[in-house]
Image (cartoon, helix red, strand yellow):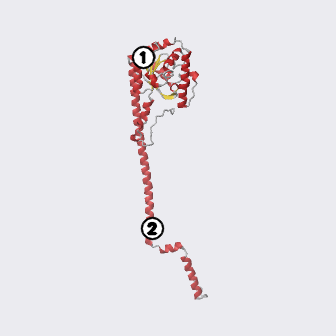
Amino acid sequence: MAEDPDQGPAEQAGKRGTLRTRLAGVPGRRMMSRVSIQSKLILMLVLCTVLAAAVVGAIAFKTGRDGLRAGAITRLTEIRAAQERDLTAMVADLRNALMIYTSGVTAVDSLRDFTVGFDELQKEQITPEQDRLIADYYTNVFAKDTQKYTGYRLNVPALLPSSNAQRYLQSFYTAKLPTNDQAIAMDDARDGSTWSAAHAKYHRFYREIVTRFAFEDALLIDARGNVVYSAYKNVDLGTNILDGPYSRSKLKDAFTEAMSSNDTDRVVLTDFELYQAATMAPTAWLVAPIPPIGKPQGVMALQFPITKINKLMTFDGKWTESGLGQTGETILVGEDLL
């Protein structure tokens, strides 16, 4: 700033003092004036180092996260493949067991004897008390259990047994034995019928099959589609799977396919479906013809063991030990999402 020659020394000194005061009052300028070049360089180096460390850390975090995710996916893929192998092996074992059972003389003889006994029961007179016993079971046990476990309300009158043989068998073996433990333990109702005589002779054989392999049930179905035997005496005992109340099921399709097969090693495996006779539980079947081949006298149908599948898919509850941690699980889902 140029000095005014017309102003005196005191006035000029006052203006210079004002300028110094204003400069001193600006903090940024005062601080920058006090920071040396060396300090500025150090500050810049520190900032660059921090920024570089942050970038490297972010990259390392992303790389580590991606690596962990890839490792987890690889582990899950390995578990899925192992589960698939184990399930395939289990199904193969069950198929082979069924082929052995149906090719044996016991299956042939038992189906023949149960069919003879079933036909005789068609001539039996059913008392009103037996009908009331059956209706009470359907209303207060079967229908209530179905609604309790699934929320599904059954049309009981449409499901009640219609043929004499079915009514007879269910009055002695279903309504009087409301639990699976009771039904599987009963060898003879001691009613004097030919069917009960066959049951006393062969039931132990089929009881061994269902308990050893954890099958949900074992059925013998004659060539006409009549369920002439059930290990657990469920409500499909005595029904006809071709035109009865449970005819709209995969069991019917498997029966038809097995009966038309000329293959001695033929075993039909159905997909799971909600089976009304099993309180709407997901149900699948293994079905094989009983000789003679070419004109089988019927089939043996084994209800797939849900408990064994659950045990396999859940690693028997040992999730962590199997590498799935606290939250991982394996689920078996069909094309129909069942």
Residue 232 is labelled as none
Identify the residue at horizontal 58%, vertical 85% (top origin). 12
Q: Residue at x 44, y 49 (%)?
A: 65
Kind of element beneath mark 1: helix
Q: Quadrant of the N terminus?
A: bottom right
Where in the figure is residue 188, as x and y percent of width and height? 44, 17
> Residue visible at 43% across and 53% down?
61
Nearest to the eye among marks 2 and 1: give it. 1
Q: Is residue 61 above or below residue 229?
A: below
When the figure is inspected, residue 273 is found, relative to residue 37, above or below; the finding is: above
Kind of element beneath mark 2: helix
Q: Is residue 195 visible?
A: yes
In the image, taking residue 42 as reference, residue 27 lies left or right, namely right
Label 1 sits on what residue type?
A: Ala
Q: Position of residue 16 (x, y in %)?
A: 56, 82
Q: Quadrant of residue 81 in the image?
A: top left
Of labels 2 and 1, earlier in sequence is 2
128 and 168: which one is in front? 128
Q: CA distance from mark 2 to mark 1?
A: 97 Å
**Amino acid tagged 2:** Leu
**Residue linked to disc 1:** 200
Q: Which residue is mark 2?
A: 43
Return the residue found at the far right: 6
Q: Position of residue 148 (x, y in %)?
A: 54, 30
Q: Residue 271 at x, y = what percent?
A: 48, 28
Name above or below for residue 210 compared with residue 49.
Answer: above
CB within 8 Å, label 2 to label 1: no
Please name whichever residue, 149 or 304, is drawn nearer the observer in this view of the structure. 149
- Give the crowd class for mark 1: few <14, some 14-19, many >=20 residues within 10 Å: some
**Pointer 2 local density, CA inside 10 Å: few below 14, some 14–19, many at least 20:** few
Q: Is residue 1 visible?
A: no
Nearer-the-camera pick, 17 or 146: 146
